[in-house]
Amino acid sequence: MSQTTAIVILLVGFFVMILLRFPIAYAVAIASILTLVYQGQNLALVPQQMVKGISSYSLMAVPFFITMGVLMGSGGISEKLIALADSLVGWMTGGMAMVNIVASFFFGGISGSAAADTASLGTILIPMMVDQGYDGDFSTAVTITSSCEGLLVPPSHNMVIYATTAGGVSVGALFLAGYLPGAILAVALMIGSYIISKMRHYPKGEPFSWKRFLKQISTSFWALAAILIVVVGVIAGVFTATESAAIAVIYSLIVSVYIYKGLTWKGVWKILSDCVDTLSIVLILISTSSVFGYCLTLLHVPSLAAGWITGISNNPIIIALLLNLILLILGCIMDMAPIILIATPILLPVATSIGIDPIQFGIMMILNCGIGLLTPPVGSVLFIGSAIAKLPMEKVVKATLPFYLCMIAVLMLITFVPSVSLIIPRLLMG
């Protein structure tokens, strides 16, 4: 059997099905099965690899983190984090844009999802910004781009998926690695927002008040404490990532129902039902991607891809730029989790061969995928933002162009300055 033909069946078949709008899990599974049939392999490998893909203790953290984010996001947390951000940066020119960005940084540390961030904060902040004189397309662009901070700020279930797929990468180190890039991304977006706000004469908010700020800190403390439970617990070695996620779910339930009282028990059962729907999609995708990964290994695709990429140039800078370009293109046509599951085994060996640390590459991959969530034709966060604002996608994309530049600048900084990602893990974990 021709190896080249098998690779064509696997990769070309997969991308053709993606372009035909097959669900990702189906595209991955069908392409893998067709390849195994062509290779004459026993199809019993398919269920074996699917079970193997989800039989991971570390992956148990994913459903817990998703559940925690949904509970906190539905429990009245959004309004409190917006008020905290307003007390901190609302006094600046373009104050509500700054509030949007800082609130996303806080909320991202709870939800870990750009889509959840946009849906929860966007429904409040976009109408609020428009009422205060901000253009609708600008308000939407700020909301969707700042939501990507939540992908970098822990706890992020996508980091857990990457750590599991990469193998041997510490979840705690990845959590720590995301803080500084997430903060730099927030600052870059704030600078872009400030310049645009100055040019368009957008308003300022109320003057800064320590009294108001401290009051909002005390109100938001219970929400922010969830982040401390997860991150500090994992880093200090008190919990594993899975244990901390399970504890965080119980804590989120207590805070949402009994402290903030944004949820009733009836609402909790509905949320848990929705979480099961989401988790079933994620776990099916992980299991089918495990079969796909087996086929990639069987056909030696990672080593072939490494040879192809390094054959273009021996220059590490060119190779690093090419890796980013590949991830950005994949982000335009695929969702985040499939990219992490499929591209990591192929591209990580290339990245490490030019001296990029696996943790640094993980942060690069997550930001690239985040940018992909904002780009047509399959940018889910872009669609959510456009739907909330009731604006054409083309208008939102045009308003987002300056913010794409800010995000690309941060991506280049992460790529070529390793300490941006690695300094905090090295200081705290060695």
Image: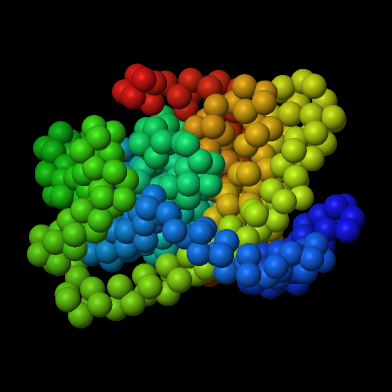
Q: Is residue 406 above or below residue 45?
A: above
Residue 75 in the figure: left or right of residue 181: left
Count of numbered circles in the view: 0
Please provide percent x and percent y for residue 60: 36, 57
Residue placed at 19% from the left, 63% from the top? Answer: 253
Please provide percent x and percent y for residue 11: 77, 57
Q: Is residue 224 visible?
A: no
Please provide percent x and percent y for residue 288: 59, 64
* Residue 365: quarter of image: top right
Quadrant of image for the C terminus: top left
Residue 1 in the figure: left or right of residue 428: right
Q: Is residue 131 above or below residue 313?
A: below
Q: How is the image coloured?
A: rainbow
Q: Is residue 143 above or below residue 392?
A: above
Quadrant of image for the N terminus: bottom right
Residue placed at 58% from the left, 52% from the top? Answer: 341
Q: Is residue 263 visible?
A: yes
* Nearest to the observer: residue 86 or residue 111: 111
* Residue 105: quarter of image: top left
Please provide percent x and percent y for residue 23: 63, 71
Residue 181 in the figure: left or right of residue 209: right
Residue placed at 16% from the left, 45% from the top? Answer: 221
Residue 259 in the figure: left or right of residue 343: left
Q: Is residue 240 above or below residue 398?
A: above
Residue placed at 50% from the left, 32% from the top? Answer: 359
* Nearest to the observer: residue 360 or residue 135: 360
